[in-house]
Image (spheres, grey):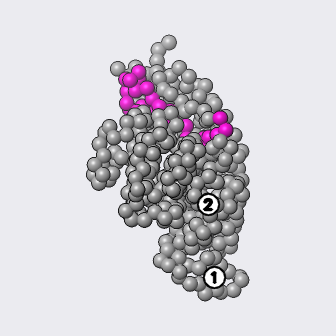
Amino acid sequence: MATPELALRGGPPVRRAYLVFGSPDLRDEEIREVEAVLRSGWLGTGPRVARFEEAFREYIGARHAMALNSCTAGLHLSMIAVGVRPGDEVITCPMTFASSANAILHVGALPVFVDCERDSMCLDPAAVEARITPRTKALLPVHFAGRAADMTRLLEIARRRGIKVVEDAAHAIETVHRGRKVGTIADCTVFSFYVTKNVVTGEGGMVTTEDPGIADWIKVAGLHGLTRDAWKRFSDEGYRHYEVTFPGFKYNMMDLQAALGIHQLARVEENLRRREALWRRYRQAFAGLPLTVPPEPAEGDRHARHLFTILLDVERLGATRDQVLQALHAEGIGTGVHYRPLHLQQYYRERFGYRPGSFPNAEWIGERTLSLPFSTKLSDADAEDVIRAVRKVCTAAWG
């Protein structure tokens, strides 16, 4: 049987209606809640933010949860809250989005990259200790795609050396490490509710911590440094004067955002079951193709199933990752790249002098990784289109 001609070479595409990567799954409950916010007139930080914070705190099992306008804001404030100051060093991984390292730079500290493990794509604990210096103040592990970094080993290293730990859990709302929920392990944990995430508020983030001092500081710092609960000053409890306790930041979440998050969070376990089923379907369908599917989580861990990232065998394919990406685009399938290693991005190359070869595992992954549509908005027919397109592209004659 002849191999179908790729759409980018003139053949018919798998889909006519383009399948957008990471399209959010928003339902009537969210729409009604947003309408109620609009009708209430309270659009900014108010009662729905407080309700979302409490629901998230209970879901994670953390002592404190503070909502902010982005995960990046949460990382920035967490760096300050754990004591990172100008001239300090923070160890993190180059296989991440820019905000992980940017937040370190925002406080005047130095991001120190350590390579990831090829299989987990998370920070390699064996390489961390060799990079610790007297200036190392914190570790910033990233739970990549929803898979837990090895927090047991990383925490042991950090506690032994007197180093703080801030988890970048942008991908990891549902993640569990060795029976412990991510968000209850480190000094601070920072989550994302960006439009492609498993819980969506459009833009938004949350910090969890067990430390009441950190919680109080982040709550105040995220709203200009105003007295705690200053958002109540225009409520029906009566006007309250506030005090500016220090020059804080404009990082507060709005009730408009929280209106989405309240109902997104209520479905988080239901949605995880749907993504687990889709995960199994993809793994089965791609068996035998020149690619590697993500491994299952370790014993005692739970994967948040945020991204389904395949690693292309570019040597067997005879095509680059970007060629495959463009071919899938022509077939009507949107994809993502998570990530091109951060140390090879222009700013980090030019400022710190990184070159290819600096972190070989991150670079190997960065040349081969491709994230497939994986939203709970996908219908079974959508998923079958993804499978057909991947099989078509990966069995094409690229030579």
Dividing the picture into quadrants, the one containing residue 238 is: bottom right
Q: Which mark is residue 394?
A: none
| SS at badge 2 | strand
Quadrant including the C terminus? top left
Disc 1 versus disc 2: nearer the observer: 2
User: Where does label 2 land, which residue?
Assistant: 209
Residue at (42, 33) in percent of width and height: 368
- Looking at the image, residue 334 sits to the left or right of residue 234; the answer is left
Residue 245 x, y percent position in the rendering:
53, 80
Q: Label 2 sits on what residue type?
A: Thr
Residue 226 x, y percent position in the rendering:
55, 79
Q: Label 1 sits on what residue type?
A: Arg
What is the span of residues highlighted in magenta in the rendered image? 299-328
Task: Identify the mark nearer the N-term, 1 or 2.
Answer: 2
Is residue 349 visible in the rendered structure shown here?
Answer: yes
In the image, 299 versus 159, the foreground residue is: 159
In the image, 83 versus 149, the foreground residue is: 83
Residue at (61, 60) in percent of width and height: 209
262 versus 309 height, above or below: below
342 versus 330 height, above or below: below
Residue at (59, 48) in percent of width and height: 172
User: Where does label 1 land, which residue?
Assistant: 233
| SS at badge 1 | helix
Magenta stretch encompasses residue 315: yes
Q: CA distance from mark 1 to mark 2?
A: 26 Å
Q: Residues within 10 Å of mark 2 (few under 14, many from 20)?
A: many
Residue at (62, 64) in percent of width and height: 211
